[in-house]
Amino acid sequence: MASALVDMLELEAKRLNFLEIITEASITAKSFFKHKGCHVICSQIIERKGIKLTNYRMAKKIIA
């Protein structure tokens, strides 16, 4: 299901002539997005309800 959603998002991004897609992925989702062609821009520490979490800003170039 997640893979189908990302594929649809990428098709829409191409249709809109976007140059890249950017996401902020959890540690758990990082490998999924890497498999879909994203690369890590940077890691980030975010805080949710007083708990510090690491996530990753990731991007994928869109080729028309």
Image (spheres, rainbow, N blue to C red):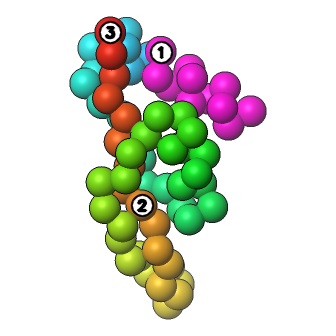
Q: Which residue is mark 1?
A: 11
Q: Check if residue 6 falls in the magenta segment.
A: yes
Does residue 28 lie above or below 32 as drawn? Answer: below
Q: Which residue is mark 2?
A: 56
| Magenta stretch, residue numbers | 1-11
Q: Which amino acid type is shown beneath numbered disc 2?
A: Tyr
| Residue 17 in the figure: left or right of residue 26 | left
| Residue 1 in the figure: left or right of residue 9 | right
Residue 14 lies, in percent from the top left, at 37, 14
Marks 3 and 2 close (CB-CB < 8 Å): no
Q: Is the N terminus in the top left, top right, bottom left or bottom right quadrant?
A: top right
Of labels 2 and 1, earlier in sequence is 1
Residue 16 seen from this side: no
Residue 6 lies, in percent from the top left, at 56, 30
Q: From the viewer's perspective, is the residue at label 2 or at label 1 nearer?
A: 2
Mark 1–mark 3 Cα distance, whole angstroms, equals 9 Å
Mark 3 residue element: loop
Q: Please name the predominant secondary structure of the magenta segment in the image.
A: helix
Give the residue drawn at x 43%, y 55%. 24
Q: From the viewer's perspective, is the residue at label 1 or at label 3 nearer?
A: 3
Give the residue drawn at x 36%, y 67%. 43
Q: Which amino acid type is shown beneath numbered disc 1?
A: Leu
Q: Which residue is mark 3?
A: 64
Give the residue drawn at x 44%, y 81%. 47
